[in-house]
Amino acid sequence: MLRINKKYLEILKNPYESEFIELTSNKCPKCQRARVGNYRIIFYVSESKKQIEIIDIIPRKNKYRLF
């Protein structure tokens, strides 16, 4: 849980960092993912609202089934 919190703070500091990969999905076309061990943080950056929305935190094995 500590690593997830640490990565969350990194996302807040710079959501456009090169380690965050944009997903290629029709369900969430502007979503990005961040790796945290065996988990993935799926998030969306709303530039108009200047917000970062965490969509989900899921185990790696399930990531392609949902998005």
Image (cartoon, grey):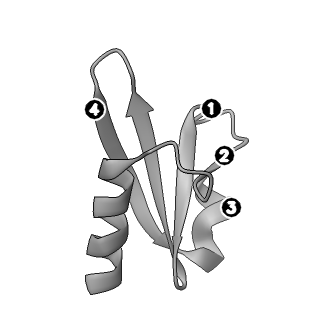
Q: Are marks 3 and 4 in contact (CB under 8 Å)?
A: no
Q: In the rendered image, which residue does mark 3 sit on?
A: 64
Q: Disc 1 versus disc 4: distance between alpha carbons?
A: 17 Å
Image coords of residue 7 (percent x, y): 37, 68
* Residue type, label 3: Tyr
Secondary-structure class at tag 3: helix
Q: Given this view, does label 3 or label 2 mark the residue nearer the observer?
A: 2
Query: Considering only order in the chain, which callout, 3 or 1, is on the residue closer to the N terminus?
Result: 1
Q: Position of residue 66 (x, y in %)?
A: 59, 56
Q: Among all residues in the image, which is located at the extreme top? A: 48
Q: Nearer the viewer, mark 3 or mark 4?
A: 4
Left or right of 41, for residue 17: right
- Residue occupying the point 32% across, 41% down: 53
At x 28%, y 32%, the residue is 51
Quadrant showing the N terminus = bottom left
- Can residue 8 be spotted in the picture? yes
Q: Earlier in the sequence, mark 2 or mark 4?
A: 2
Query: In the image, what residue type sits under mark 4?
Result: Gln
CB atoms of marks 1 and 2 within 8 Å: yes
Q: Earlier in the sequence, mark 3 or mark 2?
A: 2
In the rendered image, residue 5, in percent from the top left (x then y), is placed at: 26, 72
Mark 3 crowd level (few <14, some 14–19, many ≥20, 10 Å Cα): few
Query: Is the C-beta separation of discs 3 and 2 under 8 Å?
Result: no
Q: Answer with mark 3 or mark 4, whichever residue precedes in sequence.
A: 4
Q: Secondary structure at mark 1?
A: loop
Q: Is residue 39 above or below residue 13?
A: below
Could you give the CA–CA distance between mark 1 and mark 2, rounded to whole angstroms? 7 Å
SS for callout 2: loop
Q: Residues within 10 Å of mark 4 (few under 14, many from 20)?
A: few
Query: Which mark lies nearer to you, 1 or 4?
Result: 4
Provide the residue designation for mark 1: 29
